Amino acid sequence: MIPVPTNTKVWLAAGVTDMRKGFNGLSAQTEKVLKAAPYCGHLFVFRGRRGDLIKVIWWDGQGACLFSKRLEKGRLSGRLRKRARLR
């Protein structure tokens, strides 16, 4: 279990993202598109084109974390607003 603080926000990047990107590429996209600081401790979630892969970047205070999840069945919906934020 990864201890994420209770005041952490989860940001969802609408649209599709190039899943070949690592932490550096995704954090640059976070700054450019979401206008948010990737080193603030919030979670930033990115969706692949097919909808079966997501990547999450998170700065835990000690270093950069990059998580990925590939769905074996089903797809993630691409129906998000242009910029969405969940609490």
Image (spheres, rainbow, N blue to C red):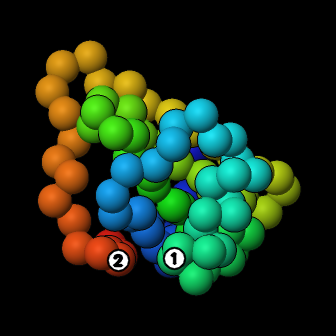
Marking on residue 11: none
Whether label 1 touches label 2, CB < 8 Å: yes
Q: Residues within 10 Å of mark 2 (few under 14, many from 20)?
A: few
Residue drawn at 29 percent across, 33 percent down = 50
Residue on which disc 2 sits: 83
Q: Is residue 26 visible?
A: yes
Q: Nearer the viewer, residue 51 or 9?
A: 51
Residue drawn at 63 percent across, 54 percent down = 26
Residue drawn at 69 percent across, 52 percent down = 25
Element type at marker 1? helix
Residue drawn at 35 percent across, 77 percent down = 83
Q: Position of residue 27 (x, y in %)?
A: 68, 60
Q: Is residue 85 above or below residue 49?
A: below
Q: Is residue 37 above or below residue 44?
A: below
Q: Is residue 15 left or right of residue 31?
A: left
Q: Is residue 18 left or right of residue 59?
A: left
Q: Quadrant of residue 13?
A: bottom left
Residue on which disc 1 sits: 34
Dot 1 amino acid type: Leu
